[in-house]
Image (cartoon, grey):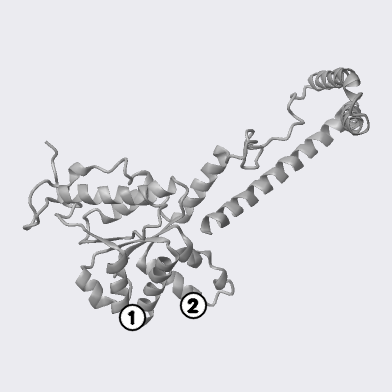
Amino acid sequence: MMYSQVLKDILMEYEKKRDKAIYEQRIRTQKVYKKIPRIKAIDKEIWETGLSISKSIIDNPESYKENLQKVREHMEKLKMEKAYLLTEGNIPLDYLDIKYECKQCEDTGYLSNGDKCNCLKQSLINKAYKMSNVESVLKKENFQTFNIDIFPDEQFEGESMTPRENMVNISSICEGFVSNFNENNEENLLFYGTTGLGKTFMCNCIAKALLDKNKIVIYQTAFKILEIIERRRFGRDENRFDDSQYSLLFDADLLIIDDLGTELSNSFTNAEVFNIVNTRLINGTKTIISTNLTPKEISDTYTDRVFSRVLEKFIPLRFYGPDLRYYRWEVK
């Protein structure tokens, strides 16, 4: 549903581009007609000749082929004269053409075979990036720039795996999440662990990978999400009920809720968190929650039904190790 609306909005922009290109072509044409009236007469004759061909096909489908060659020769002479006049007038030969931004699809978004043009595919990706709230950071933080070597390969506080081995496991699960995203497998991810362990980086990796697949990804902190909700519920803006940001929390292909637990917790916020997560679970749209809280702290902070939903439908992935912001790991 969300993809259809985004596509519809982009195609509306394409329509405006076509209208603008046609309008500008008409303005250029009028200038040329004023400067060289003979070109106007030639264009009229070309149009009338084309019309006569169409009429001949309908009226005399058997005999029109006999005159077709003569008509083509006449049309060619008209076009040559027009080209000569344009050159003499120091006017580029393509000056009267419609200047589409994309010549391949002529600003329709689709090729003649019905496939999406590359320009439309890129527009969808660009739109998704802008909507995601993380357009700039994803250039630096993605699976291609992910470096497993920054995670120490030493035992950490009695854990069975080293931080590096743990991250190899986590990154593998995350890449599988991206690969299987279109499957109705009810996969959702819960990243938990203290600050500075790579949770946000991994969220960014997933976001970019899915954005590049034309998915609509919304990345917001829990605090910002509640700001959006409160503005809609309690704001005085008369347009608050048309807030697309609010709808995207429910309709986006992937919602990433970062820093869950940093927002003010009360009965209102707990109910809203449950409403968003539960609605997305019911609709089959996927969610990633990133938090510094442990499962027990989540249970203590939120209502039991929120906690049970998170544990039941989310794959818990624990991040541990030294704080990477201060840890100095030398790769040997």
Residue 166, image x and y in percent?
Answer: 17, 51
For residue 224, what is the image quadrant?
bottom left
Q: Is residue 69 above or below residue 329?
A: above
Residue 23, image x and y in percent?
Answer: 76, 42
**Label 1 secondary element:** loop
**Label 2 secondary element:** helix
Which sits in the foreground, 289 or 200?
289
Amino acid type of the residue that numbered disc 2 sits on in the rendered structure: Arg
Q: In this view, does 112 lie above or below 154?
A: above
Which sits in the foreground, 114 or 193?
114
137 relative to 8 in the view: left or right = left
Residue 188, image x and y in percent?
Answer: 33, 60
Quadrant the C terminus occupies = top left
Viewer can see residue 136: no
Amino acid type of the residue that numbered disc 1 sits on in the rendered structure: Asn
Q: Is residue 67 above or below residue 325?
A: above
Quick one: label 2 or label 1, which is nearer the N terminus? 2
Viewer can see residue 273: yes
User: Dot 2, crowdedness within 10 Å: few (<14), some or many (≥20)?
Assistant: few
Look at mark 1 in the image and give the residue it sits on.
266
Residue 171, image x and y in percent?
Answer: 26, 48
Farthest residue to the bottom: give it: 267
Look at mark 2 in the image and give the residue it sits on.
233
Residue drawn at the location 87% of the way across and 22% of the way down: 65
129 relative to 267 in the view: left or right = right
48 relative to 267 in the view: left or right = right
Mark number, residue 213: none
| Mark 2 to mark 1 CA distance (whole Å) | 16 Å
User: Dot 1, crowdedness within 10 Å: few (<14), some or many (≥20)?
Assistant: few
